[in-house]
Structure formats: structure tokens, C-alpha cells
Image: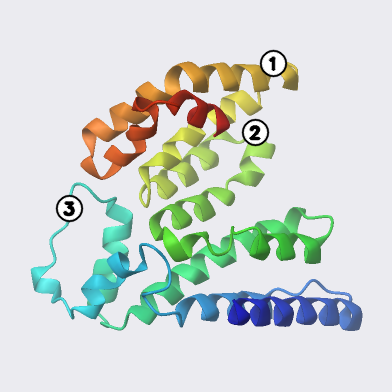
Amino acid sequence: MLPYLLVLSFVMFWMILEQKATNRKAFWVPFITLALFAGVRSYLVGTDSGNYASDFVKQKSVYNYRFSEDVEFGYQLLEYSLLNITHNYFWLFFLTALIIVGCYLKIIKKYSVNYELSVFLFITLGTYTLFFNTLRQGLAIAIFVLATPYLLEKRLIPYLFLVAIAAMFHITALFMIPVYFLTNMNIKSYYKILLSFLVSLVGSGFIVSEIASTNPRYTSYAEPSEEAGGLITLGFY
């Protein structure tokens, strides 16, 4: 826990200092600090980090690398490209951290009315450390975050483009396509919330099961909807 607190303290100290000294929102120092911290961690930190780092730890030859239909192509291409250069998993963690942290900080800096507080929440609420456990999901979410301006500006084509890029790292990013149309429907927010809830309640189990049927890696996603209390779990989500 201490290393996390030290990183948090340093980032917040620097951001406040730069704001006071230059009246400027700090970006580069927090960006590099958070990316480096994620990069230097052991593959034992995080539930799935060992799986992502396994090909690097085992010094797997690129000549033995096989692209799998069960893993999104974008991530496999990234991993394959890195294995052509190095077998040090630091670069996998560091490069993906640069992408993820950069995406978040870019959008936070653009839209936040309290930049320092937003970065504090980004770190402390678990959004930053999410990809320590689920790297592909973290990449997909961060890339989708870049679509925020296009969602607000009602620009469908670039929005769909970024969703497609995100889906190359985790297929569940495609769930965000209906969000664009729901957000921009000319009805009251109350009805949007109600519609979202009803569609989730009725359709989530079916949709998740369909995805799981096409990819065995996602079978565990369907299990909560099939067990007792599954609808309560889906309702909570």
C-alpha cells in the first residue's frame, strides 16, 4: 500500500505546485510518473498480470507465436510486435500504461472543472489500477474514453471508429454503440434511465450468453445470469 500512497502524494503535490507556480494544469510529470509506476510493477501484482506477461517471462519466440481466435486481434498484434523487440515484460506494462493513462488524463484535463480533484479520484477510486488486473479491458475502456468529445458533439463516425478500435482489445466495447443513440435521443433523462434499466434487465442475460457462446473465454461472464440471484447482479450493474 505504501508505494501507492507515495505515488499519489507525489502526483498531487506536483500538480498543486505547478498550478500555483505557473497557473497551468500539470500533465507530463503525472503522466510519466503513473505510467512508470505501472510499468515497473512485478507480474505478480494483479490477478491477470501473470497471464499477460507469461510469453515474455517464458522468452517465447515470435516464430512460435500463434494468433488465437479467442483473443482480440489488437492486443495480440501489440504483444506480437513487442515480442519481436524484447522479452522484458516491463515494456508491455509500460507501453500499455502510457496509452491508458494518456487517454484518461487528456480527457480529464479537457473537461474537468477541478483537475486536481479529478486526477485524485482517477487514482484512488480504482480507475487507474484497473488495468493492473485486467489489461485488455483497461485498454478498451481508456480508448473509448477518447470518444467522449464525439459523444457530446454528436459526431457518430469518429465515435464508432474509436469504439471499433477499443473492441480490438476487448469485444465488450461494442456495448457502447447503443449508448450513443440513447444519449442523443430527444427524450427526458428519466425515460432514458428507465429504458436502459429495462433493456438491461430483459436483454443482458441473452446478450452476454450470445457473446459467451462465440468465445469460450467469456463463458464466466454468462454464469451470474444463469445462477440464483443473477438478475439481481445484472440489475446492480
Q: Which residue is mark 2?
A: 154
Q: What's the residue type where badge 2 is placed?
A: Lys
Question: CA–CA distance between discs 2 and 3?
Answer: 36 Å
Marks 3/1 in contact by CB < 8 Å: the verdict is no
Question: CA–CA distance between discs 1 and 2?
Answer: 20 Å
As helix, strand or loop, the secondary structure at mark 3 comes to: loop
First reached walking from the N terminus: tag 2 or tag 3: 3
Marks 1/2 in contact by CB < 8 Å: the verdict is no
Q: Picture quarter containing residue 188? A: top right
Q: Position of residue 14 (x, y in %)?
A: 77, 82
First reached walking from the N terminus: tag 3 or tag 1: 3
Screen quadrant of the N terminus? bottom right
Q: Residue furthest left?
A: 64
On residue 80, which mark appears? none
Q: Which residue is mark 3?
A: 68
> Crowding at label 2, few (<14), some or many (≥20) Cα neighbours within 10 Å?
some
Q: Position of residue 102 (x, y in %)?
A: 58, 66
Front position in the image: 28 or 124 = 124
Please name the residue shown 73% across and 65% down the image. 120
First reached walking from the N terminus: tag 1 or tag 2: 2
- Whether residue 185 is visible to the viewer of this picture, yes or no, is no
Q: Which residue is mark 1?
A: 191
> Is residue 162 depicted above or below 119 in this figure?
above
